[in-house]
Image (spheres, rainbow, N blue to C red):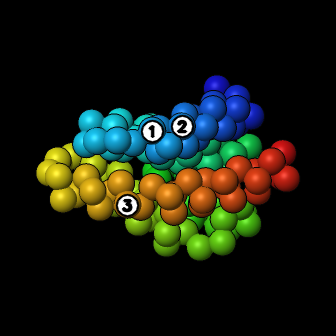
């Protein structure tokens, strides 16, 4: 899959996450939104990996590596917030309790905002 193919998928996935966030009425809806966040996060770092490879950078083989390279290439400013999103994705994927779910859910608006900025940046570079 090419970088541009993944970018198209990423835009669609982000749209679905935003849609889920608008419809949250109960814990089940929150869980669904968190699941979409996990999917968008995975697609994000893989899109950045493909982008980095397209630019000749091969050291983006992990989420942290992809965000570091994205910062080096000027696609994102600071990778640290993305590392926090990674921690949230790991927490939501590997252990579940309502407190951690609520913490992850509370970060989703910041994640969506960061994603919108990232997509604008990637669109400019294409």
| Crowding near the residue tagged with mark 3, few <14, some 14–19, many ≥20 C-alpha atoms within 10 Å | few
Residue 108 appears in the figure: yes
Secondary element under disc 2, as helix, strand or loop, is helix
Q: Horizontal and vertical percent for residue 99? A: 18, 59
Q: Which mark is residue 106?
A: 3
- Relative placement, left or right, of 70 versus 95 is right
Q: CA distance from mark 3 to mark 2?
A: 16 Å
For residue 71, which quarter of the picture? Answer: bottom right
The reply to whether the C-beta atoms of the residues labelled 1 and 2 are less than 8 Å apart is yes
Quadrant where the image shows the N terminus: top right
Q: Check contact, mark 3 vs mark 1: CB within 8 A.
A: no
- Counting residues from the start of the chain, the first of labels 3 and 1 encountered is 1
| Depth order, front residue of 42/15 | 15
Question: Circle 2 sits on which residue?
Answer: 19
Earlier sequence position, callout 3 versus callout 2: 2
Q: Return the residue at label 1.
A: 23
Residue beneath the point at 73% across and 66% down? 74
């Amino acid at each position: 899959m090419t970088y541009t193919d993944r970018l198209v998928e990423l835009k669609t996935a982000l749209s679905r996450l935003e849609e889920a966030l608008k419809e949250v009425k109960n814990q089940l809806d929150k869980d669904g939104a968190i699941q979409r966040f996990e999917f968008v996060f995975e697609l994000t770092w893989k899109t950045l990996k493909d982008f980095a490879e397209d630019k000749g950078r091969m050291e983006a083989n992990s989420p942290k590596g992809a965000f570091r390279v994205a910062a080096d290439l000027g696609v994102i400013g600071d990778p640290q917030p993305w590392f926090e999103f990674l921690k949230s994705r790991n927490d939501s994927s590997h252990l579940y309790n309502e407190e951690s779910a609520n913490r992850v859910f509370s970060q989703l608006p910041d994640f969506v905002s960061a994603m919108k900025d990232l997509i604008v940046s990637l669109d400019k570079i294409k």
